[in-house]
Image (spheres, helix red, strand yellow):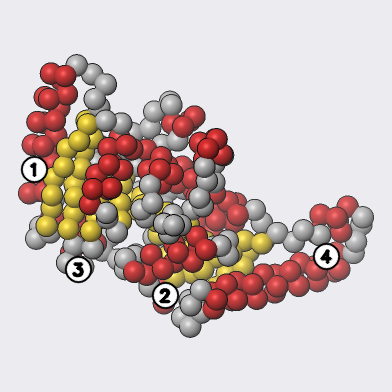
């Protein structure tokens, strides 16, 4: 597997190379360990920071136990963090980009964190490492919205070895559209209950059909259907189930909507303290 792993040398971001190293040890993998130097400063300072970054990367490769025996390529580039990461990714075409939670800035409130911008701007699966590195993800939660993007995310999770079907829960949120209306007209609670139960069963049938139609049906998944808005259902499930990894697909967007409208996946990346695999739709 070809892996790009980015670090800004903070303690939180250094979880990324440790986790990437454990992933690489499981197979014949190449790691591209990169650091992006801010180019918006005097040229002499840029050169000094480039040399220092090269030294630190070399030291990390030699000193991190998780990187022992792993083929590592240290890379230092200049530019904005998200742009530098995507330029390196474009040059090596990785199967996966691994990132820790980088330092937050005030501007992130308006344009998104580095991770969000890498997910938006690229076409590569991104693993955000929030927790300490672990050799295997034993409890995986995959949130699906019955889209092609969700099916792609599950396949990438399986192909990269980040998830196993016998250790994964497939979660789908549903909203019984008529429930609010029934409550407003004073319908009997038993009638409301029966309606919601029927919608739950319908949602389960739709989930099963979705998995079968995407050649994912003949697997030992644990399936969960839960009522509510997607983000709230996901957050509640993460809090209750305490998964090691959350797997989510992202959707193609363009123009202003891509810059200004936050998706459920971006909200999860921003607010949930769990490792997250965010997978974009396939190219083309």
Q: Residues within 10 Å of mark 4 (few under 14, many from 20)?
A: some
Provide residue 39's location: percent of width, then percent of height. Answer: 24, 25
Q: Secondary structure at mark 1?
A: helix
Residue at 44%, 44% in the rendered image? 120
Q: Residues within 10 Å of mark 1 (few under 14, many from 20)?
A: few
Q: Which residue is mark 2?
A: 165
Residue at 27%, 54% in the rendered image? 93
* Residue 203 falls left or right of residue 79: right
Position of the C terminus by quadrant: bottom left
Provide residue 245's location: percent of width, then percent of height. Answer: 40, 59
Q: Nearer the viewer, mark 3 or mark 1?
A: 3
Q: CA distance from mark 3 to mark 1?
A: 23 Å
Q: Nearer the viewer, mark 1 or mark 4?
A: 1
Q: CA distance from mark 2 to mark 4?
A: 35 Å
Q: Which residue is mark 3?
A: 27
Residue at 87%, 59% in the rendered image? 182
- Contact flag, marks 1 and 4 (Cβ < 8 Å): no
Q: Nearer the viewer, mark 4 or mark 3?
A: 3
Q: Residue furthest front?
A: 284
Q: Secondary structure at mark 4?
A: helix
Precedes in sequence: disc 2 or disc 3 = 3
Provide residue 219's location: percent of width, then percent of height. Answer: 46, 80
Q: CA distance from mark 1 to mark 4?
A: 63 Å
Asked whether residue 22 is in view, the answer is no
Precedes in sequence: disc 1 or disc 4 = 1
Q: Which residue is mark 4?
A: 192
* Residue 66 falls left or right of residue 263: left
Precedes in sequence: disc 3 or disc 1 = 3
Provide residue 144's location: percent of width, then percent of height. Answer: 54, 62
Residue 207, compared with residue 252, is above or below; it is below
Q: Which residue is mark 1?
A: 59
Q: Secondary structure at mark 3?
A: loop
């Amino acid at each position: 597997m070809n892996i790009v792993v980015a670090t800004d040398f903070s303690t939180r971001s250094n979880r990324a190379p440790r986790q990437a190293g454990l992933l690489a040890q499981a197979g014949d993998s190449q790691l591209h360990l990169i650091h992006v130097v801010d180019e918006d400063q005097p040229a002499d300072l840029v050169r000094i920071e480039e040399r220092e970054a090269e030294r630190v990367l070399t030291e990390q490769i030699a000193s991190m136990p998780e990187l022992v025996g792993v083929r590592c390529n240290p890379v230092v580039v200049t530019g904005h963090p998200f742009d530098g990461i995507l330029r390196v990714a474009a040059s090596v075409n990785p199967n996966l980009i691994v990132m820790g939670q980088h330092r937050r800035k005030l501007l992130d409130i308006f344009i998104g964190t580095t991770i969000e911008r890498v997910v938006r701007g690229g076409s590569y699966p991104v693993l955000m490492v929030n927790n300490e590195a672990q050799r295997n993800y034993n409890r995986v939660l995959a949130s699906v919205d019955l889209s092609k993007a969700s099916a792609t995310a599950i396949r990438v999770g399986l192909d990269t070895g980040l998830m196993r079907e016998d250790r994964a829960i497939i979660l789908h949120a549903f909203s019984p559209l008529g429930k609010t209306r029934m409550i407003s007209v004073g319908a009997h609670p038993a009638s409301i209950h029966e309606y919601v139960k029927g919608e739950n069963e319908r949602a389960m049938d739709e989930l099963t059909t979705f998995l079968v139609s995407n050649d994912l049906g003949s697997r030992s998944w644990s399936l969960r259907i839960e009522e509510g808005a997607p983000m709230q259902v996901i957050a509640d499930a993460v809090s209750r189930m305490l998964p090691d990894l959350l797997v989510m697909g992202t959707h193609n967007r363009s123009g202003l909507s891509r810059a200004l409208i936050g998706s459920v996946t971006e909200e999860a990346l921003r607010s949930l303290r769990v490792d997250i695999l965010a997978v974009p739709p396939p190219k083309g």
